[in-house]
Every structure is written in structure tokens, then in C-alpha cells.
Image (cartoon, rainbow, N blue to C red):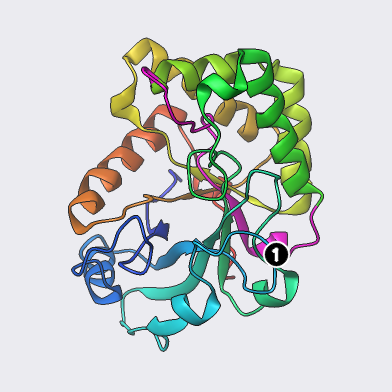
Amino acid sequence: MKFQLDHDLHIHTQLSPCSSDPNQTPETILRYAEEHGMKHVGLADHFWDETIPGTTFWPGYAHISKWLPLPESPITKMHFGCEAEMDINATIGISRKTAEKLDFIIVPTDHLHLVGSTIRQEDVGDLKTLTRLYVERWDILLNADLPFHKMGIAHLDGICLHGFKDQGTTRLEIMESIPDDEFKRLFAKTAKLGMGVELNVPVSCYTDEQLDRALRIYRIAAECDCRFYFGSDAHHPKNLEPAYQNGLMIIDKLGLDEDQKFNPFR
């Protein structure tokens, strides 16, 4: 059976500083999920655990838990999660104790453009360094003491930095500088730990030829028996429908089956 887009586990609300949209509420998100017949939808606001030394810019547990209790629906189950940030030193901003309070945790290894992690392209210097950062940060995440059975690794199609003039091309160059065997090693461990891989590729950023190359890593992930979930990464109501359509295109391009779906809510 074809992979069904019956969930969206990566949606931000107005509690994320990069949203602050008064209309981006759990109720708005739940309506979107119901209209698309989704079984599961997840709130994933940017997060930094108050118990972890580091940046104080990102919201902590007391802030993101303001939405509790979450609205209920006979169609869609809403889950309380977060996008736990990783700072410039590759410190992961969530403890295992705090993680246990959440339904689902997403960790991005690529956020080098946000407060607490800012690196500029001119500071990095070359593609070799970017490639090293990409691999090192992923390895650090995989070696963390965290409940991987309810975790996903977000948008793996490159690294975000300040100063990119053609970010889509540069991100593609980073991925293509990493050999298949290295990706197989990383994805094999991701699969062994039981961690999900997020389907989140900005299709519109690529030509058809570039998109086929960008999807290479997800094909390798499938070969390594990884499980996938969809995450729109929407920050505003207007982002939800385009992201959903983007997700359908990714699934079609990859030819995923239902048995390849990551489901942390069994």
C-alpha cells in the first residue's frame, strides 16, 4: 500500500519566535489536519530545555506547555512535541528527563543560522568544512542519551547558514560531497536506534534534475530500513496547504510504501 500522508508532526505555533503569528494556534492546526483526514498532528515549537546550559533565546518547557491541554478531535489526535535546538557547539537543548514529558521530539542538525548557533558562510570557508559539520552534528545526535523511539531528525537536505546567495545549490553541494557509504553508516545507525527520518525537501527550490539528486539521501535511508514521517515545518496558516502538497510530491517521487512509515504513537 502506498505511503499515506495522514500525519504532520512538525508544525510551529505562534509560541515559536520565528512565527509569532496570532492565527497559528492549535485550533487552526487541528482544522487543517481534520480537513486532510489526518490521524496525527504534532506541535513542534522551537525549544531549549531550561535545565541545559546554553542559549536563553529559545522557549523553554514552561512556555511551550501553555497550550496544554491540547484540543481534541474525533478525527485527529494532536500531540505535544517540540523542535529541540542544537547550538553552535552541537549541544542538544533537551534532557532525557524533559523528553519524557513530550509525545514527540524533533532535532535539527542543520540549524547554523539561528540564534545560539549562528555561523556565516564566510566564517566556515570551504565545502570540506561544511561537510565535516554536517556529519559530525549527526553523529553527536546519534550518540546522545535520548528516547529515539519517539524522535525524528529534521530536514536533512543540507545545512542552513547565513550569507548563502544560492542556498539550494550550496545545500546540494554539501550532500553530494558526502559518499554513499558515509550516508549508509549514518542511516544504518539511525534505523537501529529507531529514530524517524523527516520528509521535508523544498521541492520548489530545485529544478527537476536537482530534485532527483537531492532525494538521493532519502533513497539511501530507505535502503537502510529507515522509517519516514512527514513534517511540513509550517510557521503560518498560509504555509500549511502548500507544504501538504509538497509532501505528496516527495512521497510520489520516492515511491514510499505504508510499511516504511515511522509511527511513534503505536
- Number of other residues with Cα within 10 Å of mark 1, as a class: few under 14, some 14 to 19, many 20 or more: few
Q: Amino acid at mark 1?
A: Pro
Question: Is residue 225 one of those drawn in magenta?
Answer: no
Single out the residue that lies furthest toward the bottom. Answer: 69
In the rendered view, does 255 fall on the left or right side of 15? right
Task: Please state the horizontal and vertical placement of residue 192, each as a whole percent of the image.
Answer: 78, 47
251 or 161: nearer the viewer: 161
Task: Please state the horizontal and vertical placement of residue 242, each as a whole percent of the image.
Answer: 22, 44
Residue sitting at x 46%, y 46%: 1
Question: Is residue 162 one of those drawn in magenta?
Answer: yes
Number of numbered discs on residues = 1
Residue 74 to residue 158: above or below: below
In the rendered view, does 244 fall on the left or right side of 259? left
Q: Which residue is mark 1?
A: 53
Task: Please state the horizontal and vertical placement of residue 75, each as a whole percent of the image.
Answer: 31, 75
16 or 122: nearer the viewer: 122
Identify the element where label 1 is drawn. Answer: loop
- Main secondary structure found in the magenta portion: loop
263 or 69: nearer the viewer: 69
Residue sitting at x 64%, y 27%: 220
242 or 63: nearer the viewer: 63
Residue sitting at x 48%, y 69%: 59
Residue sitting at x 74%, y 28%: 184
**Quadrant in which residue 52 is drawn:** bottom right
Residue 106 to residue 140: above or below: below
Residue 216 seen from this side: no
Single out the residue that lies furthest toward the top. Answer: 209
Residue 223 to residue 213: above or below: below
Task: Please state the horizontal and vertical placement of residue 98, each as a whole percent of the image.
Answer: 66, 76
The segment highlighted magenta reads: 144-166
